[in-house]
Amino acid sequence: MKRDRAWLLLYLATVIAATLIHDPRWLAVGLALVVLLAGREAGVLLRRAVLSVLAFNTLISLSYLGMAWWRDFSPWQTLLLLNLRVLLLTCLTFLFITRVNLFQALDFSRSLTYVLGLAYSQALTFSRAHDDFRYALASRSLQRPGLLDRYRASAAAVSWFIEKSLHAATQSSQALRSRGFFHD
């Protein structure tokens, strides 16, 4: 078995284990192991993971705190468990992405490799479009854009991304269907 495929299987098993574990101590041990595996990249990995989940976890945590206050129960064990699990899974995923070539890991299946290729090309297209939107806003502003201008530009970009995603998904599903990937 190839190294990348072995890492993929280990990653999937670890994700399943992390979702089944309900003891914050074991999740903390898992997070420590992932950070140790990251080596010199541990700081960058943690920073990237925290920034990625910050908005989501903050919103969920505040909502859960409000519900706990309303229903008069202690939310701390659940919040610790939730936030540790999300951070562990995010760090694990970022470490996996930096260390494993998904194309080699999935090379046993033409279908999976093809779908990964479609997803990867769409991600590259969206990344380039995101940069284009950012540069367009900067180049059309004489001074640093204000918050309202950035919100408007973001809303226009999100609208474009959604429209482009729907169009690309339709095109991809039609292409896959014509090649026999889906059966009616």
Image (cartoon, grey):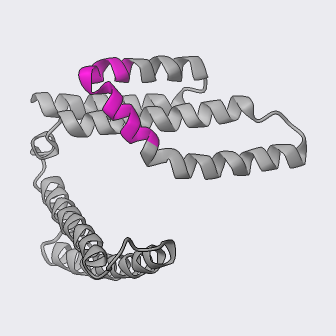
Q: Is residue 96 magenta?
A: no
Q: Which sits in the foreground, 53 or 85?
A: 53
What secondary structure characterizes most of the magenta part?
Answer: helix
When the figure is inspected, residue 110 is found, relative to residue 88, above or below; the finding is below
When the figure is inspected, residue 51 is found, relative to residue 100, above or below; the finding is below
Q: Which sits in the foreground, 92 or 147?
A: 147
Q: Is residue 47 magenta?
A: yes
Residue shown at 44% from the left, 21% from the top: 30
Where is residue 69? Give x, y as percent.
Answer: 86, 44
Residue shown at 39% from the left, 36% from the top: 47
Q: Please tell me how many numbered marks the rendered image carries.
A: 0
The residues colored magenta run 33-50
When the figure is inspected, residue 88 is found, relative to residue 121, above or below; the finding is above
Farthest residue in the front direction?
A: 143
Residue shown at 12% from the left, 73% from the top: 179
Residue 112 relative to residue 28: left or right? left
